[in-house]
Image: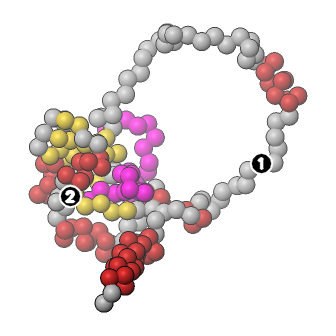
Amino acid sequence: MPPFKTILIRALILAIILTAPLLFAENGTGIGQLPENLQPPSAERTSMTRLNQQKAATQQGFRHAQMSDHAPAGAVRSYDIYRHSTILQHGNNHTLLPDNALIHIPDSLQHKVVTTPRGTFIPWPRFYLANRSWIFTHEINLKQAEGTSPLKEDVLKQFVRINRIVVALHQNNPISILRPGTPAKVSGKRP
């Protein structure tokens, strides 16, 4: 076979292999992901007269705003991202995932999910590449993430068989997944 035809055939096969997941997967984007009760934007716009009235109604208007180099007086709120994340640990490296991003954790890998990290923080993409032997990712759509559409039972059964920690992804990024029937946490505090 001539070399040009061989290259052309290989390129065609590679293109089919690379685009097949996009053609057959539900990727969570598009018109189907919008809420059913979504209202159109209102046509009313604030006129310049109304905007000036709103400016005058404020105590000092917008002209007398002052910039400051100091934080405002009062208690400083601290936020500890480790308290509000799931931590995966392997050796002396760890990474952070959003709470509830783990779909399945086999008993043999429970020790990989820790509450206190040690060692070096590694961003999720690098951590996943280094630990693909015990981590499996599963792409979900937004309806599954918010708990309005459940994961299929046969998919969940497959997760049990592969004996890996399964991480929920949306557009290749870890995402929290709310199980159907579970109310969402509003406070952001851990129990």
Main SS class of the magenta portion in the image: loop
Under circle 2, the secondary element is loop
Where residue 73 appears, x then y in whole percent?
49, 9
Between the C-alphas of marks 1 and 2, the distance is 48 Å
Q: Amino acid at mark 2?
A: Arg
Say if 138 sits above or below 96 in the image: below
Where residue 154 appears, x then y in whole percent?
31, 75
Question: Which of the two residues, 72 or 17, is positioned nearer the viewer here?
Answer: 17
Is residue 73 visible to the viewer in this orientation of the structure?
yes
Under circle 1, the secondary element is loop
What number of labels is visible? 2
Image-based side of 21 in relation to 53, left or right:
left
Instruction: Tell me, yes or no, whether the two marked residues, 1 and 2, touch with CB atoms within 8 Å.
Output: no
Which stretch appears magenta?
Answer: 165-191
Q: Residue at x 30, y 90 (%)?
A: 1
Quarter of the figure with residue 25: bottom left
Image-based side of 170 in relation to 167, left or right:
right
What residue did someone put label 2 on? 132
Q: Residue at x 49, y 13 (%)?
A: 71
Numbered circle sitting on residue 42: 1
Where residue 124 appears, x then y in whole percent?
29, 47
Quarter of the figure with residue 84: top left
Magenta span contains residue 167: yes
Earlier in the chain: of badge 1 and badge 2, it is: 1
Say if 125 sits above or below 29 in the image: above
Image-based side of 7 in relation to 50, left or right:
left
Q: Residue at x 31, y 41 (%)?
A: 85
Q: Amino acid at mark 1?
A: Ser
